[in-house]
Image: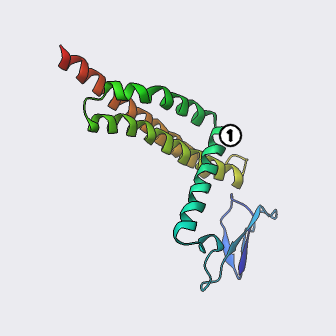
Amino acid sequence: MQAYQIYSVRCVLAYVESYIVCPLARTRIFTVSQPDSDNTSPYKSKSGLSRLMAATGYSWKGLKAAVRHEAAFRQELGLVIVLIPFAFLLARSPVDLLMLIGSLFLVLVVELINSAIEALADAISLEHHTLLGRSKDFGSAAVFLSVLFATLVWVTLILTNLFSRS
């Protein structure tokens, strides 16, 4: 197994023999290991039902971590819990219901991805870095667009129901 040493995010990285070196910095942030080409990841060794069970466990672990550590996810989850019963009252067809609930779940999914981007960026460096800041901004923009989409779906179906009942 080859190990790569990463020294700094702020400099141009140059691949030298078996490690990554930055000539501008001398503090090691972390080491990245890359398995040999003929070996597979030990995390991928499970198959079938045991892999499905493990993946489900990791998913629950991620959801619990999001609830515990991400205020925005907690707020959005609370809103989803409140709005789902209204979706059943508002929907006039299964497609309406799918759009209403699906748009809410889309917001949660995008928020989880945004939280993952932010956690990775913070793990790389807590100092300001233009590219890390830009990646966080992209994640935030994705959340904004998903919230905008959910709002448009809900407003459209509410207005459609109001005007079709008149």
Q: Horizontal and vertical percent for residue 98? A: 33, 39
* Image: 116 above or below 143: below
- Residue at x 56% of width, y 49% of height: 135
Q: Is residue 96 left or right of residue 37?
A: left
Quadrant placement of the N terminus: bottom right
Residue type marked 1: His
- Considering every residue shown, the one lying at the far right of the view is 27
Q: Which residue in the structure is indicated by mark 1?
A: 69
| Front in this rendered view, residue 156 or 164 | 164
Colour pattern: rainbow
| Front in this rendered view, residue 112 or 22 | 112
Q: Horizontal and vertical percent for residue 110? A: 49, 44
Q: Horizontal and vertical percent for residue 27? A: 82, 62
Q: Horizontal and vertical percent for residue 145? A: 42, 38
* Image: 125 above or below 29: above
Q: Quadrant of residue 86?
A: top left
* Image: 162 above or below 12: above
Secondary structure state at the residue bearing disc 1: helix
Q: Is residue 141 left or right of residue 7?
A: left
Q: Is residue 72 left or right of residue 146?
A: right
- Considering every residue shown, the one lying at the far front of the view is 49
Query: Circle 1: is it few (<14), some (14-19), or many (20+) Cα within 10 Å?
Result: few
* Image: 7 above or below 111: below
- Considering every residue shown, the one lying at the far bottom of the view is 38
- Residue at x 66% of width, y 68% of height: 13
